[in-house]
Every structure is written in structure tokens, then in C-alpha cells.
Image (tube, rainbow, N blue to C red):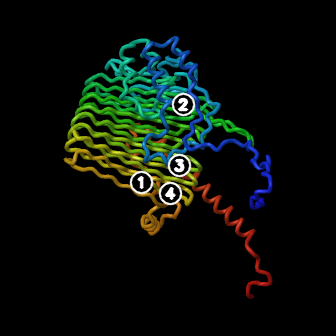
Amino acid sequence: MTEATTEPSAAKAPTATPRTATPPATSGPAKRKRADLTFVLDRDLVDRWSATEPDWLTADRRAAAERFDALPIETNRLYTPYVDLRTTDLTETRAWEATATEPAPPTRGATGAGGGAPDGDPAAVIELREDRVAVLTLGAATVAAGVTVETLGALIARDARTAQRLLTNHASIPDDDRLAQLTRAGWNQGIAIRVPAGVRLDRPIVVRWLSGNPDRALLTRTIVELGAGATATLVEELRPSGPDIACAAGERVPQSLFTGSMELHLGSGADLAVASLQELGERAVVFQHRMASIGDGANLRWAMAQLGGKLVRSRIDNRLEGDRSTVEQVEIVFAAEDQLFDLTSYTRHIGRDTTGSLLSKGVLFDKARSYMKGLISIEKTAIGTDSFLGEFGMNLSRAARAVAIPSLEIDQPDCRRAMHSSSVGPIDETQLFYLESRGIPPDEARKFIVLGFLEPVVARVPLEESQDRLRQLLEDKWAAGLARAVASTATSVASTAVTAPVSVGSAPAA
């Protein structure tokens, strides 16, 4: 529409502005911002919990809730452009109000309900299905060594002083992370694992979370404490609690929320290996925080596989506080369809002669996205540091997007090594050519390259059953992605054939 104008005249009286000049207000929904979190922390629920919880826990929850309200989703300006929560819809998601602290008597000491206890008699198994404790079993040798594996509710009832020390430790959960403070304020289930000084466990402790009920939130804390000289292995499994419900066309698709913190405290000379397999359902929203304080001469090894979930936002904080402490971290992502994995790693070298080796790898099908962000900080006290950070992405489709942002902050120049490396791209054609030249079909060659790219985590899983399960999950995801790619290509070819102009009057030569 154009608007006619006339030159003002002194003899002509001014006219009123037509009321129709103001555009009508639109009634459509406001555009959602990338950092908008639709989940609401129920303050009334936190207040109801205070009626049965110690005063120190209520105060800790409320302080965390205030930080949750005040903080942005991302405080690091370098990473702000990569925040995107728009695929989440948690407006109707509510936290479990009451969760069990002990399993029902028939299941205590029994094998796991979610697939059974792994072969080889692990040192302990605890399985938590939504708001219930499905399994809690400890081997006789584990109990005799003084190792404890229990829910946080049971620890508070049994030893309130130890529970207060572990739960209110501000070094355990980053105060500058809004989603971490959500977990601290609203956690409704948790586990405490304590291994006394000098105890060496030959078999792993298995922690299994089953979550995914539509419109339900499970907010969890896992606290692990190893005394001086203790040795342990922890296998964490995150699985769906049931199949996704079917939704009709146009019907709202309910999502679930799982938040989890893993807080590790390693005494001097302690050794801990942690393997985590995340395979939650395709409608799960996952917020994870892992923090580790590593003492003198202690050694920590992470091996993590991220496969499931609609959106996964993960943060790892390693604090190498003790002299000669070491951390080795490997994390892989296998993403497909419209999955989004947002991974951040912070490693702080504080003690002398510390060592860090951190590796992230991502493979992406379809329109999946992954953001791999890492920062190594070497403080003035960290003389003799040796630290490496590598981030590598493999895009299997043109629509996939992988981003790698490795960074270094060095305040102590007297280092053995401080370096980072990154790359993002498709499958290496030279590797593909080599395998094909040996008679391997192209699709099989691609499969070998992709699964070999992810093998560093698989090889570090300490349980044979869990290792086999992870390999099968990776193969299944590869097969599903390949089938979608073939179907998409066939559809595209058929569409081109229908719309292409037909040459009339031509015929093959006799």
C-alpha cells in the first residue's frame, strides 16, 4: 500500500491522523529465543520437601534456586552463539514429587530388572527406574571392604553429617552454570558411593538409570568419593524406562527431562575409571554435569558415549588440584535425524606436573548437530603441565553440522606440553579408496571407518556385556542412518524423474 502526501499549506487546517494508520496487533505466538528454557522449577515442591529434610539441605536448595533464577543458560560469551533449546518443549513437564530411598524387599539383592546384573558379578549394582529403586545389591566382598552404595535419602537418614559435607560442597557443582543449579535445587533422586582408603575393587560398580516417562522430570545427583589409595571402576548406563508413546498427526509430542550431576572426589593416590553409556529415548531432554576434584598422584579416566536423546547438553569440569594428578577423557557422539549434542569440557591444571589428555569425537547423520567446546586452563601454580585437547567431527550428510572450538589459557609458561587440535569434515576419501581397493564394498568400507573412528570409547568400557551392547547400538544406528540415506536418495531420484522434461519422438536405434 502507498500513502499519498501533500505539501503543507498555511491556509489549510491540519487534519487528524487516521485511526487506521496503526497496524493491528498480531495474535500469533511470540518468537521463541534460542536460550529459552521452558521447564519451570516448582518452588512449592521444594518448600514441601523442606518439611521432611534437614535445614541445611533446604538452605542449599533455596540458594541454588536463586542462582538458577539469576543466571543465563551460558555464561561463556565464546559459547553463547551455540546455545539452542528451541527443540525442547518442557512446559508441562513436572518433577517426580517423591522418590524411593530403598528397593522393595523382594528386589533387594536381586539381579537387575532392566536386563539383569552384568556377567562377572560386579562389586555392586544399583538400578533406579523413574521414582523407584528397582535393584540394590552389593557383593559380600564389597560389603566386607566397607564400601557403601546407597541413595542420598538413605545416606541423609543414616549419616547426616557426611551427607551435609558431600551435598553442600560448592566445588562439586559449578556455581556459574544455570542448569547445574537447577539440579542442585530440584534433585529428587541421588546416589552416594564411597570407597574407603586403600580398598581396591576388582569388579566394577554399575549404576543404571531408567528414565523417559512423558512429561516427567528426573533430577539426579551421583556422588563418588574415593579415599587415599583406593581403586574403583564405575559403569553408568542411561536407558529408556519404556517405549515412546504414539502420537497422532498434529498432536503434542510429550518430552521427558533427565538432569544428572556426577561429582567425583579422588583422594591422594586414588584411581578411578568411569564409563558412561547414554542411550535414552528420542524424546528425552538431557542436561548432564560431571565434576571431578583430583588429589595428589590420583588418576581419573573418563569414557563416555552419547547416543540417545532429543537434545543433550553436557558439561565436564576436571580440577587437577594435586601434584602429579592425571585425567584422561574420551567422549563420542553418534547423532542422527535432528538430534543436537552440546558438549563442553573445562580442565583446570592447578598442581605441579599434572597431565591431561582430552579427546572428543562426533559422527553425524541427516540434520544432526554437535558442538564440541573445550577449554584447558593452566594456572600459575601448575609448573610442568602436560595437556592436550582434541576435537574431531565427521559429517555423513551435507545437512549435518559439527562445530569444534578448542581453547587454551596459559598462565604458567613452564609446561611440558600445552596444545590442541581439531578438524571437521566428511569421511577421508583416501581411507575409503584403500578399503575399496581391497575388495570391500563402499557401504561396508564407510561402516568400518565410522565405527573405527568411535572405537576409542568402546575399548575403554570395562564390562564385556556393556562393551558388546555399545558396539551393537553403534551398528544399529549406522544401519538405520544408512537406510534413511538410501530411502532419501530413492525419493529424490523418483521426484527428478517425474518433473524432468520428456523427450518426445526419440527411440532407441535398431
The relative height of residue 23 versus residue 491 in the rendered view (above or below) is above
Alpha carbon distance from label 3 to label 4: 10 Å
Local crowd size for mark 3, using a 10 Å CA cut-off: few (<14), some (14–19), many (≥20): many
For the point 37% across and 24% down, the residue is: 169
Work out whether residue 186 or residue 79 is closer to the camera in this orientation and state it: 79
Under mark 3, the amino acid is: Ala
Q: Which residue is mark 3?
A: 335
Distance from label 4 to label 1 (Cα)? 10 Å
Residue at numbered disc 4: 395
How many C-alpha atoms fall within 10 Å of the one at disc 4: few (<14), some, or many (≥20)?
Answer: many
Which numbered disc flags the more N-terminal residue, 1 or 2? Answer: 2
Label 1, label 2: how far apart the Cα atoms are: 30 Å
Name the residue located 74 percent from the left edge and 40 percent from the top edge: 248
Q: CA distance from mark 2 to mark 4?
A: 30 Å
Q: Residue at x 38, y 24 (%)?
A: 193
Who comes first in sequence, dot 3 or dot 1? 3
The secondary structure type at the circle numbered 1 is strand
Q: Secondary structure at mark 2?
A: strand
